Image (cartoon, rainbow, N blue to C red):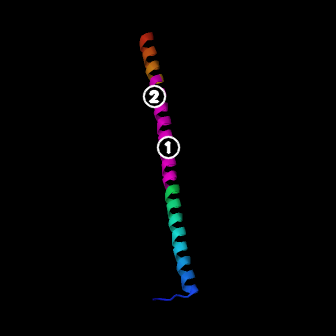
Amino acid sequence: MVVRDDDELDLEEATKHASILQNKQLITNNVINKRKVRDDHVVVSSFLLLLLQLFLLLTCDSFRIVVVVLLDS
């Protein structure tokens, strides 16, 4: 039978506890990073949608101007 003193047990418990806390921190950081990536994708998607709307607006207006000029001549 192996007999351990209290200091060894306390050190072992502290090491396990530190390892658990480190794993929790890694998981938390992983979740935060995933949210940042998702938020970045939302921002990029919104920006691209805005550009598409602007392009369509400009294209439609240009098309209308060309049609009006052709019809007037």
The residue depicted at 48 percent of the width and 23 percent of the height is 61
State which quadrant residue 10 falls in. Answer: bottom right
Q: Nearer the viewer, residue 46 or 22?
A: 22
Q: Give the structural element (helix, strand or loop) at label 2.
A: helix
**41, above or below 58, in the image:** below
Q: Give the structural element (helix, strand or loop) at label 1.
A: helix
Which residue is denoted by mark 1 in the rendering?
42
Which residue is denoted by mark 2 in the rendering?
56
- For the question of whether residue 68 can be seen, the reply is yes
Examine the structure image and report whether residue 46 is included in the region drawn in magenta.
Answer: yes
C-alpha separation, residue under disc 1 versus residue under disc 2: 21 Å
Question: x, y (%) of residue 41?
Answer: 47, 46
Q: Nearer the viewer, residue 26 or 67?
A: 26
Q: Which residues are magenta?
A: 33-60
State which quadrant residue 14 falls in. Answer: bottom right
User: Which of label 1 and label 2 is nearer to you?
Assistant: 1
Locate the N terminus by quadrant: bottom left
Label 2, residues with CA under 10 Å away: few <14, some 14-19, many ≥20 = few
